[in-house]
Every structure is written in structure tokens, then in C-alpha cells.
Image (cartoon, grey):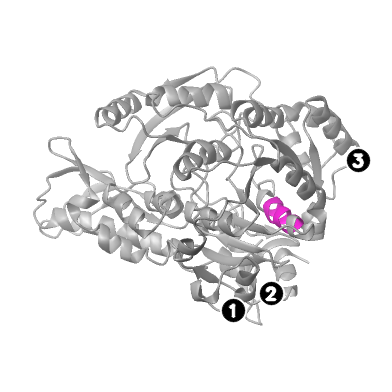
Amino acid sequence: MGDIEIARSVKLDNITKVAEKIGIDEEYLENYGKYKAKVSDKIMQKIGNKENGKLILVTAVNPTPLGEGKTTISIGLADGLSYIGKKAVLALREPSLGPVFGIKGGATGGGYAQVAPMEDINLHFTGDIHAITSANNLLSAIIDNHIYFGNELKFKKVTWKRCVDLNDRQLRAIECGLSGEKNVVPRKDGFDITVASEIMAILCLSKDIYDLKERIANIVVGYNEDDNPITVADLKCQGSMAVLLKDAIKPNLVQTLEHTPAFIHGGPFANIAHGCNSIAATNMALKLGDYVVTEAGFGADLGAEKFIDIKCRTAGIKPNVVVCVATMKALKYHGGVAKEDIKVENLPALEKGMHNLLKHIDNLKNKFGVNVIVAINRYLEDTDAEIELLRSKLQEHGINMSLVEAWGKGGKGAEDLARKVVELCDKECNLNYAYDLKDDIKTKVEKIAKNIYGAEGVEFSPESLEQIEKIEKMGYGNYPVCIAKTQYSFSDDPTNLECEEPFKIHVQEAILKTGAKFVVILTGKIFTMPGLPKVPSAEAIDIDENGNVVGIF
């Protein structure tokens, strides 16, 4: 059976029953049918003083284009913890429609390690991402309306972009205002994908609706004739934007196929944004569960770094354990094997490709100071020889490994990982950051590039240097940096999979995000609006004769 058929074969519990497992009374639920609910932040007044549970971060090696099953492992681990009798809660990101209809497909796990209802979660869910799109584009409309009616704020340059939650490369750069009407000012513009919108980042980094409204008010949307910033507060629309987000800020509660409670809330991209679910959902989960499993997008060079340097700093939390997910196919891919041959046993390539995994482990263990375990997401074609080679090499480096079969066996297939994680959770963890906030922006980027990516240096474009100088003069040099980089390599070149030769990171732009309170650093040829592949997943998605959605994987 495919993922969608497996998901439909399981009878789900009513969401009120799922909530009861972790002590959420019905008065705090806002039901979206039988199997989805939003949880009111008022519950934090009741549970806010409870001790936090243990936080487990799931990250990965640099992936192949189809990913390494990080979400499947996260779900399997949460079910595995439940299977061994622990009070476990999941806290994951919401899927974006861009990848669902693009190349990666859905983001609800796979096989018997899924969150459900999978079609709803992968599509419109509770409308959070649509609300973010609307708030983002309301701001765009208000900016251009202000200019139309006389431009009292003296806009010289608009930096705010519209957004849509689809992969559409045609919208990366556009011209708008071409109607020819009097007072309509034509200008060049562009779209981001919604999950790269600053509104998404703000929603995920806000403690509550009031923090969210304050952050929205601080967004810089453009510059006036004196080159001074213009903010949302100047346009007086932070209140109306917050109204559109008043429900979206509330965490969503669903369940796994084994009925483990799961918060799925917020979904910033990890290669072009900070890649973590919301602080609101994570904080709620930590008060309600003894063990909380969360994930950070793509490889640890992107997801885990931003989780630690941005999310942990903002929320005042730290992971007790980090699980680094790898697959044999990814390691062979980074060992020089072509995509079409990665399912074939190739021990030399596997051993060569282990440098990618070992670099991530070194970063996590020695740079960030966290407890690490490797989880191998096992595939049917993985051979005993490959598994034994990997196990022995990791033992040489003092790293524990767990073979996970959650896809085919659910929580039972992650029992070994769950037991090892529980043991690791009791070990001391002294979290380190990749840089100090007092470092200047260039130094922050250089520390990440050299220490985390392994680059020999950073080349800044003249435009990015001007932008960095301006940001620091405005007083925002103490912000964290959010590096937008390819997910496929430690370098900024997606074809440089092995990173054998010395490489540099090439910074193209520095973009100030005063609402999210970080500076986005665009490297290489990264785009904040992805494109579709030649054969997108959209071609396989349909509704069958029984009215069921098919083709989502």
C-alpha cells in the first residue's frame, strides 16, 4: 500500500481523546472537524509553570533531491517513545503547497510513521498558510494604495514583496502597476513563496498574538527619499494584519497513526528561511509532554544551525539530544554515485560519502556541544554489508547508531532509537552557539561558513557589503543571521556534493528582517521563490471515482 492508503486504513481517535492524553481539557480546543483542533494559548496560564519535558531535535545529512525521511524518523521516534511507555509529543512544521505539488511531495511522514489526516495536513489544513499569504499581501496592497493617494511617507524604494504558497519561477521578478490609471506608479516587484515570507518567520518566533503584532509593526517595508526606513507602524496596518493571523497563531493538534499527539504549526523553509516550527507550539508541547520530538529542515548545516542560533536563542530552550538522520543512498550520493545508481550496493562510495555525516556529527557534538545519535532510515535495498560498514566506522568515532524501520513497522520499528534517546537525554548538554550576537554581521557569516560549512572563506558582493554596512548603521548589527543556501551541499553550489576541494561561500545579498529580528544572507544562486521540476508531483495528484484524493506521497 502507498502512504495515503496506509493512512486511510487506520481508524483515528477523536481529537478530544488525543488531547486528553496530554492533559488538554476540551475548553482549550477549537475543533476543525473530528481529527484537527487548534489549542488556545490560554492553556499556558494553567501549565506555564510546569517543568519542561526533554527536547529532542531531529536533523539530517545533506539530502538527495527526494529527502532522507527526516519527518518519518521524527514521527517514528515519537511513536517509539510512546511504545516504550513514555509520554511523548511531536512538534513539527506544516507542509507548504509548493513542495507538495513540486518534487518533494508531502511532509507528513511515510508508511506506518505518519501524522493524520494526511491529505488535510498536506493541503489546506486549518488555513494558517493562507492567512499568512493574506496578511502579507494586504500589506503589499496598503503600500501601493498609500503611494497611489499621494505617497505621504515619500516612498522611494519598496522592499516588501507579495507572496503565494506555490512554486512559480515566473513570479520571481515582475512589473506591476501597468494599468495606466492616473496616480498608479509602475514599478518592478517580485513574489516570494509564502513560507519564505517574513510573516511566516514572525508567526513562528512570536510568543503570542501581542508579540506577533509588535513584530509586524517593526517590519521595514521600504525606504524614503532620505533613505530612512518605513515600517508597518508608519502605515498603521499592524492591527488589521494581526486580525488576519489571530487564529493562525494558535498551534494545531493532530495525531500520528498510533495516536501520539502531534502539534503541527508554522512552516518556514530551511534553505531560504529558518526552518523550524513555531515557538508557541514547541513551548506548549514542552509543558504537556515528558519527551518532545521536533525537527529542523534539511541538513544540520542549515536546519540545526538555525534551530540553535535563532530559535533556541529566541525561545530560551535547548535540545537534550540531537538525532542525525542518514540513509545509505544519501551517503553514496555524497560519495560520488549518480542519482540513478544510489540504490545499488557500493561500499567504497558509502565509505567516501561518510565524510558528510561525520562533518555534521562533528558540528553537532564539538561545535554546538549537544548529545548526538545517528538514526539510519533503513530502506529495503540496504545491504547487511553497508549497514555493518557504517556501524563500524561510527563506532571508531565513538558515535552510537540506531537502525530505524519506522516506515514499515511504526513505533516498534523505532524502539531501539527511542530507548537510546531516553538514555542520552539524561546526559549533560552544554549548548554552544556558532557566533556571538555582539559579533558584526560579516564575522557571524564567516564563523558559520568556516566552522560549520568547512569553507575556507567568504566572498561578499559589493551590493551585500553596502547592505550590511547600512543594516549595522541602522543599529541592527546584533541580530542573528539566517543564511539562505542550497540544502544539497555544505558549499553554496548544489552540484558540489563531495566538497573535496577548498571552497568559498559567495554572499549575494543581505536582507534586513526587523519583524523576525534576523538578517537573511542570500548565498550562491538561491531563490526565495522556487520553481517546479520538469515533471511535478501535481501531475500525479487527482480525485478518484470515490471522491478520495490520490497521488500525494
The vertical placement of 439 against 180, above or below, is above
Is 117 located above or below residue 414 in the figure?
A: below
Of the image marks 1 and 2, the number of the one nearer the N terminus: 2
Residue drawn at (76%, 43%) of the image? 423
Magenta residues, start to end: 72-80
The residue tagged 3 is 384
Residue 464 drawn at (x, y percent): 35, 28
Q: Within the image, what quadrant is residue 300 found in? A: top right
- Select label 1 or label 3 by which is in front: 1
Q: Residue furthest bottom?
A: 546
Residue on which the image places disc 2:
12
Asked whether, in this view, residue 253 is left or right of residue 529, the answer is: right
The residue that disc 1 covers is 34
Find residue 530 and report its horizontal and vertical position in percent.
Answer: 48, 48
Give amino acid for label 2. Answer: Leu
Report whether 14 appears left or right of 113.
left
Which is nearer the N-term, disc 3 or disc 2? 2
**Crowdedness of circle 2 by 10 Å Cα count: few (<14), some, many (20+)?**
some
User: Amino acid type of disc 3?
Assistant: Asp
Q: Distance between the Cα atoms at labels 1 and 2?
A: 9 Å
Cβ–Cβ under 8 Å for marks 1 and 2: yes
Q: Name the residue: 33% across, 23% down.
A: 462
Q: Position of residue 48 (x, y in %)?
A: 49, 57
Cα gap from disc 3 to disc 2, whole angstroms: 36 Å
Q: Amino acid at mark 1?
A: Lys
